[in-house]
Image (cartoon, rainbow, N blue to C red):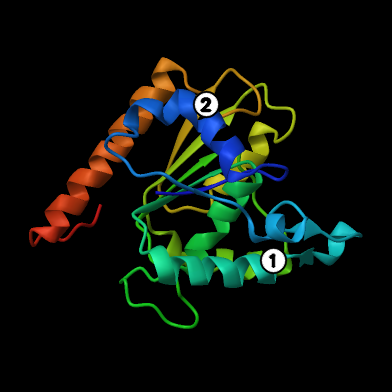
């Protein structure tokens, strides 16, 4: 599972943030945390919003897009993508670049089968709004973790992102802008990943693999 960090984050920071929720799963799930390409250039984040925001143009998006396509080409396909905060916003637009049938093209260069987002929000960049219109890409299982006390990304914004997906599963917790690890959240995440693994096994044995 590819894992995407937040705005001022890194792969190492995300690994620490994920530990309470995913730590016990590391023996059975391969988590691939990556640094945004901006970090190598002394920058941060997956993109930066230009001002006025109404213009809807984000600096750094093309660099991130090209880098991710190359990453998927070299290390993919991935079973799924997980993102936190801005990484969750990025995860939320990637289905618009997804090849649902697994046959990549210039328009749909990515292959993955599920998405998990924590503290996510819908990006309003013009380029991203176009991706949200690719409805077939959003026909995939998605899990959305959000905090009712989140003051960084209000829960309403996380719900707006969740509604872009065909059949989202929403997990609400009482905390803030964190990757929550309550017993309820953990149970749902484990069940979600187990089901994905079982569906994948069925697909490789000749089943449809669909939900």
Residue under circle 2? 172
The residues tagged by marks 2 and 1 sit, at their Cα atoms, a distance apart of 29 Å
Image side of residue 95 versus residue 151, left or right: left
Nearest the eye: 83 or 28: 28
Residue 62: image quadrant is bottom right
Q: Earlier in the sequence, mark 2 or mark 1?
A: 1
Q: Secondary structure at mark 2?
A: strand
Residue under circle 1? 61
Q: Residue furthest bottom?
A: 106
Point out the frontmost of discs 2 and 1.
1
Task: Tell me residue 68's x, y (percent).
Answer: 54, 65
Whether residue 136 can be seen here: no
Residue ID at (63%, 55%): 36
Residue 14: image quadrant is top right
Nearest the eye: 24 or 139: 24
Residue ID at (34%, 26%): 24
| Label 1, residues with CA under 10 Å away: few <14, some 14-19, many ≥20 | some
Image side of residue 88 versus residue 80, left or right: right
Task: Tell me residue 1's x, y (percent).
Answer: 39, 49
**How many discs appear?**
2
Residue ID at (85%, 66%): 55
Residue ID at (37%, 55%): 140
Task: Tell me residue 124's x, y (percent).
Answer: 72, 58
Q: Is residue 118 above or below residue 51?
A: above
Q: Is residue 204 above or below residue 186?
A: below
| Label 2, residues with CA under 10 Å away: few <14, some 14-19, many ≥20 | some
């Amino acid at each position: 599972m590819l894992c995407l960090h937040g705005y001022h984050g890194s792969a190492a920071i995300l690994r620490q943030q994920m530990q309470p929720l995913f730590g016990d799963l590391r023996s059975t799930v391969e988590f691939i945390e990556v640094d945004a390409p901006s970090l190598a250039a002394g920058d941060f984040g997956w993109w930066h919003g230009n001002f006025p925001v109404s213009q809807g143009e984000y600096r750094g998006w093309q660099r991130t897009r090209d880098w991710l396509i190359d990453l998927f080409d070299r290390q993919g396909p991935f079973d799924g993508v997980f993102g936190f905060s801005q990484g969750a916003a990025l995860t939320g637009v990637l289905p618009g670049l997804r090849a649902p049938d697994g046959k990549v093209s210039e328009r749909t260069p990515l292959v993955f089968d599920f998405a998990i987002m924590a503290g996510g929000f819908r990006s309003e960049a013009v380029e991203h709004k176009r991706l949200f219109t690719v409805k077939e890409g959003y026909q995939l299982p998605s899990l959305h973790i959000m905090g009712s006390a989140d003051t960084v990304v209000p829960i309403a914004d996380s719900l707006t992102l969740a509604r872009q997906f065909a059949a989202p599963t929403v997990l609400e917790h009482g905390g803030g802008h964190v990757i929550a690890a309550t017993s309820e959240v953990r149970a749902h995440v484990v069940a979600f990943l187990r089901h994905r693994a079982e569906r994948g096994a069925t697909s490789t044995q000749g089943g449809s693999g669909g939900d």
